[in-house]
Image (spheres, grey):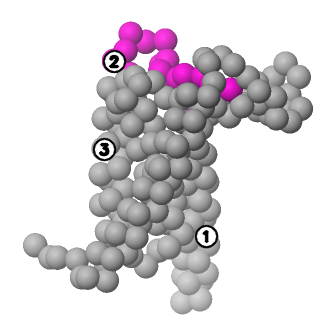
Amino acid sequence: MTHASPKARGKLGGALALALLIIVVDQITKVYFNTAFTFGERVNVLPFFDFTLLYNRGAAFSFLAAQEGWQRWFFTVLGLVAAGVIIWLLRRSPGQPRFRAALILIMGGALGNVIDRLVYGHVVDFLLFYWKDWYYPAFNIADVAITCGAVLLVIDELLRGRAKSRTSAGT
């Protein structure tokens, strides 16, 4: 069995610290909205944006929210497994900062929502965008981190693919 070098362990520690920062910011905002707002309350901020307090028992876009409760544990386990896989990937990719940043964002967001599921039995959402009669599903800081991480992951893959095609074209 090979052991990670101190430098690699330090990089993993830094990555985990950044994921923890995302979790802390996410949880602080959720505690604030959970205590300062009543369920369903909305405060208009902009003509297309409100703060609100809503709960989601499902996943993105309330996927499986109407189920009997098993989804709470399914999405909790899924988030924990994803975090484990991400830690494994982080250990294997020390020279890929964009890829690692994407993974850190996804892991921090996933674990922020896992905490909600364990503590409340649902995810706390409080950001609501809309236009006239159209509403985007409410979301939270963890969801923003997951989405930004997913976008960055796609960008990283596109840029790496482009670099590989340039390298192979030059040989």
Q: Is residue 139 left or right of residue 86?
A: right
| Residue visible at 49% across and 29% down in the picture | 123
Q: How packed is label 3: few (under 14 Cα within 10 Å), some, or many (20 or more)? A: few
Numbered tag placed on residue 70 in the rendering: 2
From the top left corner, tell me how far across and down residue 59 is, in percent.
Answer: 49, 29
Disc 1 or disc 3, which is closer to the eye? 3
| Residue visible at 54% across and 76% down in the picture | 164
Q: Amino acid at mark 1?
A: Leu
Q: Which quadrant of the figure has residue 165?
A: bottom right
Q: Secondary structure at mark 2?
A: helix
Q: Is residue 55 left or right of residue 51?
A: left
Q: How packed is label 1: few (under 14 Cα within 10 Å), some, or many (20 or more)? A: few
From the top left corner, tell me how far across and down residue 71 is, in percent.
Answer: 38, 21
| Residue visible at 72% across and 31% down in the picture | 51
Judging depth in this view, the residue of 20 and 71 nearest the camera is 20
Numbered tag placed on residue 159 in the rendering: 1
Q: Are marks 2 and 3 in contact (CB under 8 Å)?
A: no
Which numbered disc flags the more N-terminal residue, 1 or 3? 3
Residue farthest to the bottom, as pictured? 171
Which numbered disc flags the more N-terminal residue, 2 or 3? 2
Asked if residue 156 lies in the magenta stretch, the reply is no
The magenta stretch spans which residues? Answer: 52-71
Judging depth in this view, the residue of 93 and 10 nearest the camera is 10
Q: CA distance from mark 2 to mark 3?
A: 17 Å
Residue topped by disc 3: 81
Which numbered disc flags the more N-terminal residue, 2 or 1? 2
Q: CA distance from mark 2 to mark 1?
A: 39 Å
Image height of 81 relative to 63, above or below: below
Asked if residue 63 shows in the view, the reply is no
Q: CA distance from mark 1 to mark 3?
A: 27 Å
Q: Amino acid at mark 2?
A: Trp
